[in-house]
Each structure stands twice: as C-alpha cells, then as structure tokens.
Amino acid sequence: MELCCCISARSIQYSAVTEAVRENILLIENDLKVVESSLLDELQDLISEEDTNRFKASSRIDQAHFFAEIVEEYDEERFLLILNILKKTSFAHISQKLMKSYQKSKPSQSRSSSCPICRIQSEVDIKTIRSGLKREGLLPHSLYKDINKATAGEGHQNALWQGLFYHLKSLKPKEKITTEFINVFDIPKHKSLHSFLLKNNLHNYNCTCSKRPRLETDHVRHPISDSSEESNTSFKNPWQNPEWYDDAVKSSSSETEQRNIYYNAGTANSDFVRIYLCQQAFLLKYVIKVIIFTD
C-alpha cells in the first residue's frame, strides 16, 4: 500500500531523529547537564513551564533522560535547532554525535517539501488544538463532537481536517481568520510548524503538493456507526454521513478531479483516514451503493 508521500517522509524522518537520540543515549546520560549549565535557559523557547519545573526537580541523570525524551519526538527543524543550542552550551561533542547518527538515516525526501496543508494533516493531532480552535470561534459544534470521539493520531485524521478547512473557507474576513488559525499553532509542541505557516501561504486551505496522495482502498470503507446501543435497537443507513463530511467532500471536488473521503473501519471508534480516488472509482462506488440498496 502506497501511503501519502508527506506522511511517509515524516515517519521516516521522525524515526531518524529518534534513532540518533537512542544511539547516543549513554553519551547524553553521562555528559549532559541541563540545569547545572546554561542549557536550560537556552531551551526556554522550546519547552513549557511544566517541563522547566520537571528539569529543576530532577537529578542530573533524570534531566538527561527527560531531555532525550523531548528531543526524540522533534521534527528536523527543531532537532537541528537543538544541535545548535548544544554547541552554544559546551556540548558540541554531543551535537556532533547526534548529527552523525541522524545523517546515517536521514530520509531522501525533506519534510519541508510538503505544502502547509499536508504538514498540518500529517504532523498535528487535531485534538491538541481543539481548545484553541474553539476559543477563537473557528470550530463548529458538530465537528467538535466528532473530534472528541476520534482516537486516531496525527496523519490519520484527514477527514476531520477537511471538515475544518471547509468551515474555515466559509468564514470572513479571510485574512483575520487565517491569522487566528495560524496562531492556534503557536504552542511549544508546534513552534516550528507555526514558523513555517507564517512564511507560507495556506492557499485557501487547499493542498498544493505536486503529487496527489494515493492510498489503496483495501480494508477501508464508508463511515458506519459502531454504537452498540444503536446497532441493537435500530438500523442505521451505512452510507449516511455527518453534515460537515458531505460539505467537505463537495468542497474538495474540482472540475477535473472528483475526490472522496473514506473512514478507516479497522478501529472501534470514529478513526478516520482520508483517501483520494480517481473519478472512475468514485463512480464505481456509487454504482455499487445503488445495487446494494435495490437488491
């Protein structure tokens, strides 16, 4: 199965950072001093107040372990920033070792080649920003409820993201809405993405990658309610979609390309996987639906 290029690149890249940290964990454990050096001060723009307090309350070795836990989840931009910080704070030998290990498994495709929309969909768990979206009035109530029910992680929530993007397209004034949306990512976990979004046009929330993502349809079907209460008391049309879902499908269609969104049926809750199909496959799905309900 061929996954979306940006999601695949991200997975490889994140594992490269993780491998670099784990390969050098003994060096970090033996040599790194976070609180006792100027390193903690340099990290203030990258970590939360809670993280700072945890560093201060931990032993030197525990500080090193916590530092490794944080860094191994970073993307390339933040990882390289950490390496520069280590150089500035008398830990250049650790920085050099981490870089050497990272370059061994660095992916051939840079994640920065992905467009803003693909980066958002592949890097961000929408549940982590729902409070910010709701606070800014950017999240419709129906979509908020669907987000609360979802258990899939980042990279597997494209249907939810498309529902949000459709809603944002309808809001005005567009410049103000775009600014508010971008600022939702101005949190420690998404600092590098926030910086990227400030420098790149969101193009009305449309993907601008040169290659459209493709995904096989095996083990994937239309959304079906998995509520045990409903399944025991009434029949629910399996082709019935949330209102925001139907709107998102219409929004993501174009004159030359009909695209449809499917949900991942391999989980017990509303886990979503957005896939793209060509116009012929879309029409085939419709024909199959007609056949099923006319039999």
Image (tube, rainbow, N blue to C red):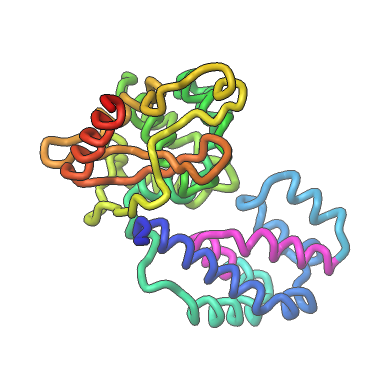
For the question of whether residue 164 can be seen, the reply is: yes
Which residue occupies the foreground of this view, 72 or 237? 237
Number of marks in the rendered image: 0
Which residue occupies the foreground of this view, 117 or 11? 11
Which residue occupies the foreground of this view, 9 or 291? 291
Quadrant containing the C terminus in the rendered view: top left
64 falls in the magenta region: yes
Q: Which residues are magenta?
A: 60-83
**Residue drawn where x is 83% and y is 64% of the image:** 62
Helix, strand or loop: magenta stretch: helix
Position of 137 relative to 85 (above/below):
above
**Residue drawn where x is 31% and y is 36% of the image:** 205
Residue 181 x, y percent position in the rendering: 43, 32
Which quadrant of the figure has residue 290?
top left
Quadrant containing the N terminus in the rendered view: bottom left
Position of 92 relative to 271 (above/below):
below
**Residue drawn where x is 36% and y is 35% of the image:** 162
109 falls in the magenta region: no
Q: Residue furthest front?
A: 295
For the question of whether residue 168 can be seen, the reply is: no
Which quadrant of the figure has residue 40?
bottom right
Residue 77 x, y percent position in the rendering: 48, 61
**Residue drawn where x is 40% and y is 30% of the image:** 164
Residue 196 x, y percent position in the rendering: 40, 50
Give the side of residue 135 with respect to residue 66, left or right.
left
Give the side of residue 209 with respect to residue 133, left or right.
left
Which residue occupies the foreground of this view, 133 or 146? 146
